[in-house]
Amino acid sequence: MLSKVLIVEDEPLLRMLAVDLVEEAGFKALEAGDAEAAIILLETEIDIRILLTDIELPGPMDGLKLAAAVRDRWPPIRIIVVSGKQKPEASDLPKGGVFFSKPYDVWEMTDTLHEMAA
């Protein structure tokens, strides 16, 4: 069974590119356009191993708040936070979380996904 990666990105083209990257790396991709949809998937899908979320999301919960909520409710899930506009402080990331600036390096992201899923 393929490990599941939940991708949370509000820009459809960027979400599609992230899905392609995740699937080409050998994972099953799940998609959400905002934090609310992501929480629903987290509550209904089993075995999500990795959350890959943009910081800038529509609605009341941004990617950093989503990452913190995931760390609290689903501690085993590994977390990758991405942004093209801001660089959070290490203290803003949940424990064990990793940050990538957009555009991120495909090979580096692929390596990180494999390390997190191992």
Image (tube, rainbow, N blue to C red):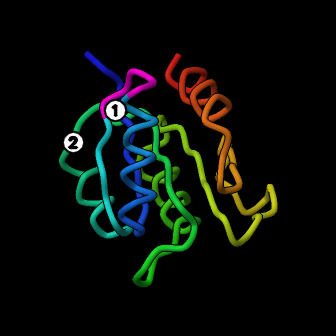
- Label 1: element kind: strand
Note whether 95 is above or below 58 in the view shown. above
Q: Which mark is residue 70?
A: none
Which mark is in front, 2 or 1?
Answer: 1
What type is the residue that disc 1 sits on? Lys
- Residue 88, x across and y down, in percent: 75, 64
Q: Nearer the viewer, residue 19 or 39?
A: 19
Which residue is identified by label 2? 45
State the residue at coordinates (42%, 68%): 11
| Res 33 quadrant in image | bottom left
What type is the residue that disc 2 sits on? Glu
State the residue at coordinates (60%, 35%): 106
Q: Which residues are magenta?
A: 24-28
Q: Earlier in the sequence, mark 2 or mark 1?
A: 1
Q: Residues within 10 Å of mark 1 (few under 14, many from 20)?
A: many
Q: Which mark is residue 4?
A: 1
Task: Check contact, mark 2 vs mark 1: CB within 8 A.
Answer: yes
Is residue 103 on the magenta stretch?
no
Q: Report the side of 59 relative to 2 (left or right).
A: right
State the residue at coordinates (57%, 28%): 110
- Residue 91, x across and y down, in percent: 79, 59
| Res 46 quadrant in image | top left
Q: Report the side of 73 relative to 107 (left or right).
A: left
User: Which quadrant is home to the N terminus?
Assistant: top left
